[in-house]
Amino acid sequence: MPAASLQIEKVEHPSERFTTELETLERGQHYRLTLVLKPNGPGGKVGDTIVVRTSSQRMPVLRVAANTYLFERVRTFPDILDLGTLRAGDVGRVALTLMVYREGGSNFHARLSTDVAGLNLKWEQGPKGDRYQTTITLIPEKIRIGSIKGSIFIDTNDPEFPKVIVPVYGQIVER
């Protein structure tokens, strides 16, 4: 028995963050829905629902989750520095990397600082001038047993994003 013909009557979404395009692959049978994120929209993670209205009696409305993430022009990876739980004797062997990116352009400058005692930051600009790689180490003599909570502050020459803050968390235990 052949599959019933299905027509897509309308595609709706409440968001201005993206556009959708419907392509018919096989009329009445197969369709492709493409979501294109607008690059100049507000940054961040957003969950929207795309509503697809169909000719089906059994399922006239399909809801499609649209989870989008638009990076800001200046961003870090990771966006939170979670040190996890470390034994006090191991802190001298820990080295983490924090990347700072600026999309577009090559004259990006950044300076980093922190309010976390015992956190050492060493950064260098990438060869294209659009990013910095930061090596983060812990200074054993300055790290104390207990929780770590603070921030890394990034001052940039980008007029729209002059300061970026990366939260820092962790726990130092004796053994």
Image (cartoon, rainbow, N blue to C red):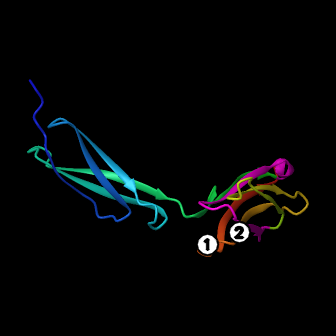
Q: Nearer the viewer, residue 129 or 101?
A: 129
* Disc 2 secondary structure class: strand
Q: Nearer the viewer, mark 2 or mark 1?
A: 1
Q: Is residue 161 left or right of residue 21?
A: right
Is residue 19 located in the magenta-colored stretch of the structure?
no
Q: Work out whether 155 lies above or below 70.
A: below
Is residue 112 located in the magenta-colored stretch of the structure?
yes
Q: Type of residue at label 2? A: Ile
Picture coordinates of residue 81, whole percent (x, y) = 67, 58
Q: Which residue lies under the disc numbered 1?
A: 161
Picture coordinates of residue 28, whole percent (x, y) = 14, 37
Which residue is located at x 10 percent, y 26 percent? 2
Near mark 2 (Cα within 10 A), the count class, few <14, some 14-19 or many ≥20, is some
Q: Work out whether 138 lies above or below 110.
A: above
* Disc 1 secondary structure class: loop
Near mark 1 (Cα within 10 A), the count class, few <14, some 14-19 or many ≥20, is some
Image quadrant assignment for residue 98: bottom right
Where are the magenta residues, as a range?
88-116
Q: Nearer the viewer, residue 104 or 59?
A: 104
Determine the residue located farthest toward the top in the rendered image. 1
Q: Type of residue at label 1? A: Phe
Which quadrant holds the N terminus? top left
Q: Earlier in the sequence, mark 2 or mark 1?
A: 2
Which labelled disc corresponds to residue 154?
Answer: 2
Q: Nearer the viewer, residue 51 or 175?
A: 51
Picture coordinates of residue 67, whole percent (x, y) = 40, 54
Q: Is residue 151 left or right of residue 87?
A: left
Q: Nearer the viewer, residue 88 or 169?
A: 169
Disc 2/disc 1 C-alpha distance (Å): 10 Å
Query: How many discs mark residues in the rendered view?
Result: 2
Which residue is located at x 66 percent, y 65 percent? 166
Q: Work out whether 74 lies above or below 162.
A: above
